[in-house]
């Protein structure tokens, strides 16, 4: 694909400019971008086209590219390129013209009441809309979006607030789920009608509601136990250790037949019940339970972010040496973030276990940890609305594509969305104000925006 | 290391009421001796300047005092109140800050994504007690501490002359303003002894004059002892009561600015030895 060999774009499509002046005004970068757009057009044509099979190995290429449809994609690529070229040339004027809009937007987003009414609107939709949805979407909402929003909000504390890369986050979710399965069992399981979800019997039976605080406590302790030795590590090392921890928890659950029932997992975890009300297989009550918990956790973490604790996390993320020199016990604060994230994960685990009733170690694979991390980054690291949006959009997308594209291709679109997002909007859907500033500073060449990079360095003499 | 053989100098004798006393401190990195047997004391309420050529071990000394490095030998006694001696060697940096030793950095290290006032508040809050539960529930004590933190941070910004810059990002401030903000952040931790690492580096003459006044006011109005690393001799000579000189990790001279300026060892360290003109250098 030689950009220079490409025929020049149709000058007639650019009102007010003759073909010649347009061609003369194009620089090397414009041509390079044209090449990129054409390449993207071919990739998208391949992605959306037919797929090959054992009999026709090249069918994927010929069926996608050597058909009239390629023209449509090339034209779309050209249109994209023209739009980009015009934007580069006239963006200043457009920005100036739109300056009042921008100021208005900033006033609104800076206004507390405007933001609160936004939250209330979203909450109203979350309360009123789900009962109208099909059972399929209710299922997605409860067992995917609701649970994962809670997980994402929790991981956001660890990755977004404190800047610690945790790749084994799902382990705490597993611990929460197994805690629920264990404590909802019965001490004397041999009596008729008493079936424990796990082969191991607890000293006392608990309703899932009372398991919630127990799971929070268990995960808090697990978080402290894992964090205390490992949080002295930085960046990449911490990521590897947590990744290992996640796998250890899953494999232990898989192999401890006599305690966790091995790969078959737990079954028969009872539903929630409180004050005489019993949750059942009905999805909506679970949705409202989840929604309530999400709203509470959201509000608590919002306070946390704008407090001494949240500021200290930002300081540690920005420059650990300076943070320590300013009197912040860095290890203690990192542990705190880790433990708070872990307990949120445990909370989600209990609700998950009780809602589905049965689960197996296979529910807690590495990919689940990675997905939660992707939701955090996609939504905007360190941003609570971002965490909610990130998880919701990225879970909704593959499900919504189910009826429209080849089911095997669904995650190609998912991946493409991530790539495009990270190129054009690395700060995420709703960036946190502090994070957005960090990215701005990094682009200007000062300061590090990368939470994944080791914060601070060894002090230079 | 080709350190010239010098007699053991110490900057301790004659100080009856030290706020910090470093005794025989040695720090090595592999084969490189960063600090060799350094003994030095800062008198309560004085401004002591540490000078020396690049790589002489000045910042290493700061890093040992603040717990970033741990010396191989020697002790560092910190006396927040007369007669109350605390050993600093081996303590964690944040503990040392909480004990009352605050510092600034040679290459400014602010929290760039936070505003000026938030930077200072972090310093103030190192003395507060709000935990995660209190912060989440916004308990009365949390709210009280938050108000106190705001008020104190504003006072300190006013003190260093940045009250109009409170809501700007630390990264958006000018170089001189960033230097002063770093000082405000250090002051916010309520230190007894303030360590300033080349506060005048990269500032213009006006900013230098402001800085000189600021250091004096920290010393007189706030009553803090100040340990100052500085290359700007005019600033050192005007604010410091005593000067200690390091070269190749060794203390080569200590005394009043005038004494140190006349000291041949110091002149040699700064200008180098010459075969024929050693005495010329001393007289110039």
Image (cartoon, coloured by chain):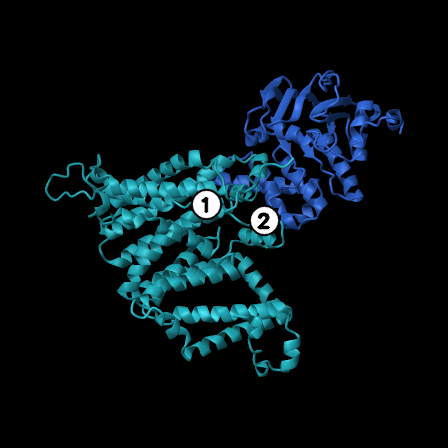
Chain colours: A cyan, B blue
- Residue A135, by quadrant, is bottom left
Protein chain holding label 2: B
Residue A326 located left or right of residue A161: right
Whether callout 1 and callout 2 share a subunit is answered: no
Protein chain holding label 1: A
Q: Residue B100: which disc?
A: none
Residue A5 seen: yes
Residue B114 percent across, percent down from the top left: 59, 47
Residue A97 seen: no
Q: CA distance from mark 1 to mark 2?
A: 20 Å
Label 1 with label 2: CB-CB less than 8 Å: no
Residue A354 percent across, percent down from the top left: 25, 49
Above or below, comparing residue A174 to residue A88 in the picture: above
Judge the density around disc 1: few (<14), some (14-19), many (≥20) Cα neighbours within 10 Å.
many
**Residue that numbered label 1 is attached to:** A165
Q: Quadrant of the C terminus of chain A?
A: top right
Q: Which residue is most to the left?
A: A192
**Who is closer to the viewer here, B175 or B154?**
B175
- Residue A199, by quadrant, is top left
Residue B26 percent across, percent down from the top left: 63, 22
């Amino acid at each position: 694909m030689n950009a220079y060999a490409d025929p020049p774009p149709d000058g007639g499509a650019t009102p007010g400019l003759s073909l010649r002046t347009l061609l003369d005004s194009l620089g090397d970068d414009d041509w390079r971008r044209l090449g990129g757009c054409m390449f993207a057009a071919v990739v998208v044509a391949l992605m959306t086209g037919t797929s090959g099979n054992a009999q026709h190995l090249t069918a994927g290429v010929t069926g996608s590219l050597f058909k009239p449809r390629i023209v449509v994609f090339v034209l779309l690529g050209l249109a994209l390129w023209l739009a980009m070229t015009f934007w580069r040339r006239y963006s200043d004027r457009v920005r100036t013209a739109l300056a009042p809009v921008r100021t208005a937007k900033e006033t609104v987003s800076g206004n507390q009441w405007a933001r609160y009414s936004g939250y209330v609107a979203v909450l109203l939709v979350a309360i009123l809309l789900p009962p109208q949805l099909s059972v399929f979407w209710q299922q997605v909402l409860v067992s995917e979006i609701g649970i994962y929003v809670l997980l994402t909000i929790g991981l956001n504390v660890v990755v977004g607030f404190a800047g610690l890369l945790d790749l084994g986050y799902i382990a705490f979710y597993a611990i929460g789920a197994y805690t629920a399965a264990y404590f909802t069992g019965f001490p004397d399981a041999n009596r008729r009608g008493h079936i424990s979800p796990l082969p191991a019997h607890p000293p006392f039976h608990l309703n899932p509601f009372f398991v919630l605080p127990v799971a929070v406590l268990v995960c808090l302790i697990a978080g402290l136990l894992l964090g205390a030795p490992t949080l002295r590590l930085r960046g990449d090392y911490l990521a590897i250790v947590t990744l290992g921890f996640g796998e250890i928890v899953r494999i232990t659950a898989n192999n401890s037949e006599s305690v966790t029932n091995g790969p078959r997992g737990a079954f028969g975890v009872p539903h929630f019940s409180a004050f005489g009300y019993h949750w059942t297989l009905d999805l909506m009550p679970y949705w409202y339970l989840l929604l309530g918990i999400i709203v509470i956790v959201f509000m608590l973490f919002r306070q946390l972010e704008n407090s001494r604790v949240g500021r200290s996390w930002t300081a540690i993320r920005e420059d650990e040496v300076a943070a320590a020199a300013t009197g912040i016990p860095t290890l203690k604060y990192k542990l705190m973030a880790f433990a708070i994230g872990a307990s949120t994960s445990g909370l989600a685990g209990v609700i998950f276990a009780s809602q589905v009733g049965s689960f197996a170690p296979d529910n807690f694979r590495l990919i689940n940890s990675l997905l939660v991390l992707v939701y955090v980054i996609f939504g905007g690291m360190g941003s609570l609305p971002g965490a909610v949006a990130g998880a919701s959009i990225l879970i909704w997308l593959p499900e919504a594509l189910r009826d429209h594209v080849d089911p095997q291709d669904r995650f190609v679109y998912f991946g493409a969305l991530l790539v495009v997002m990270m190129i054009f909007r690395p700060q995420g859907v709703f960036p946190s104000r502090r994070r957005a500033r960090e990215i701005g500073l990094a682009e200007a060449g000062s300061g590090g925006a990368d939470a994944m990079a080791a914060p601070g360095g060894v002090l230079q003499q | 290391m080709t350190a010239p053989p010098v007699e053991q100098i110490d900057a301790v004798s004659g100080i009856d009421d030290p706020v910090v006393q470093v005794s025989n401190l040695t720090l090595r990195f592999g084969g490189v001796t960063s600090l060799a047997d350094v003994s030095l004391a800062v008198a309560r309420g004085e401004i002591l300047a540490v000078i020396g050529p690049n790589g002489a071990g000045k910042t290493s000394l700061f890093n040992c005092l603040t717990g970033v490095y741990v010396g191989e030998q020697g002790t560092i006694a910190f006396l927040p109140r007369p007669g109350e001696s605390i050993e600093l060697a081996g303590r964690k940096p944040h503990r040392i800050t909480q004990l009352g030793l605050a510092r600034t950095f040679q290459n400014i290290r602010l929290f760039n994504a936070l505003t000026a006032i938030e930077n200072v508040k972090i310093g103030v809050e190192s003395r507060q007690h709000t935990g995660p539960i209190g912060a989440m529930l916004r308990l009365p004590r949390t709210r009280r501490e938050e108000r106190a933190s705001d008020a104190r941070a504003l006072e300190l910004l006013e003190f260093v002359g940045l009250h109009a810059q409170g809501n700007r990002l630390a990264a958006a401030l000018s170089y001189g303003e960033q230097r002063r903000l770093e000082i405000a952040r250090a002051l916010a931790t309520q230190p007894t002894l303030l360590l300033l690492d080349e506060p005048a580096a990269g500032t213009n003459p006006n900013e230098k004059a402001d800085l000189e006044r600021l250091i004096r006011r920290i010393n007189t109005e706030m009553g803090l002892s100040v340990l100052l690393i500085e290359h700007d001799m005019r600033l050192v000579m005007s604010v410091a009561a005593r000067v200690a000189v390091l070269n190749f990790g060794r203390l080569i001279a200590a005394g009043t600015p005038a004494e140190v300026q006349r000291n041949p060892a110091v002149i040699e360290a700064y200008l180098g030895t010459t075969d024929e003109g050693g005495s010329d250098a001393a007289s110039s």
